[in-house]
Amino acid sequence: MKNNFLPLYKPSISSKEIKNVNSCLKDGWISSKGKFVSSFEAAFKKKFGYKFATVTTNGTTALHLALLSLNIKPGDEVIVPNITFVASVNAISYVGAKPILVDINRNTWLMDINEIKKKITKKTKAIIAVNLYGQLANLKELNKIAKANSLKLIEDSAQSHGALNDSFSNNYSVAAAYSFYPGKNLGAWGDGGAVTTNNKKLYEKILMLRNWGSIKKYYHEEKGFNSRLQPLQGVVLSEKVKKLSSWNKQRNVIAKKYIEALDGNKNIVLPKIIEGNSHVWHLFVIRIKNRNKVLKEFDSHKVEFGIHYPVPIHKQKAYKEHKQYGRKIQLADLYSSQLLSLPIFPKMQDQEIERVVETIKKYS
């Protein structure tokens, strides 16, 4: 490796993808329509067992369109975890609704089920379950809560391509929003996203909204958006989706090696998997008390690291007007200073894993 630098992740670009992109260019499809986009939509929905898939410009847009199509509007409240990427919360703000932040579970670091129950009011209309780090949220329990309170359950699946539980997640949520940012388990050569659902009316609404509110050209039924995926990304993703299962298996092998090597270290808390879940390890996140010390050593040893996420939503200046801004949210406050993402990517070599493990063991 150049400069002996170990990255957090490695994007994949194959000769087959390059060949297919060249075919797309020669074919003349430079706008977001035609066989290159529709073929990926067909492959993606088949891969995950959904009836419908609509690709979009990016994952944030996918979540935004899902909320709009479910008629989430100004004055509504949407429950979302406090530890997540800001896009999960921004999408709620885009439709004029209010995000209601909940703390995380001390074992899984995903949204705490008990905290959700405390936050439901008459204004609550939906729950966004963020499938963080590569693991599905406790969708079965979230589905029960949603049904009992007449709420919509939506998945933010930006980090969970291919993750499963005992039952397919699409049995629980009304829609799932995906991101194809290059660093994801299924990443494009740029931005991209998708919404999957089994609800035909929801699918048709999203399809219309992503295309200027139009089904028939020049006839606009609603004020929509220009949120279509570029065909070149469809070409790339159609090839990559074939490899996703293999890549996820490789990630699981690497995660197992990390767990075996670091288990028993009293200064490290390892990630926990919810019973019945199949993790795809988009990120391998540990909790470590002396994170700053370890970060310095990683830097000196040329090992890239990640912090997901250093500032919880309730401390972000973008949400300074929020009633929860600056208030204490116990585990989010504590864990945001301790969570550390280790390098993980398909074809990661044993010596690379050992290098990471030795550094942590020596300086933790």
Image (cartoon, helix red, strand yellow):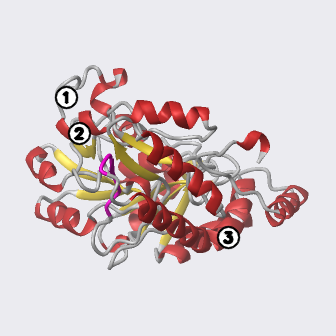
Residue type at mark 1: give it: Gln
Which stretch is magenta?
266-272
Pointer 2 and pointer 1: residues touching (CB < 8 Å)?
yes
Name the quadrant of the C terminus: top left
Q: Which mark is residue 39?
A: 3
CA gap between label 3 and label 1 equals: 44 Å
Q: Which mark is residue 297?
A: none
* N-term-proximal mark, 3 vs 1: 3
Disc 3 crowd rating (10 Å Cα; few below 14, some 14-19, many 20+) is some
What kind of element bears circle 3? helix
* Residue designated by label 1: 324
* N-term-proximal mark, 2 vs 3: 3
Residue depicted at x 55% and y 37%: 298
CA gap between label 2 and label 1 equals: 8 Å
Q: Main secondary structure of the magenta part?
A: loop
> In this picture, is 266 found above or below 364?
below
Residue depicted at x 43% and y 65%: 260
Q: Is residue 87 visible?
A: yes
Residue type at mark 3: give it: Ser
* Residue designated by label 2: 101
Disc 2 crowd rating (10 Å Cα; few below 14, some 14-19, many 20+) is many
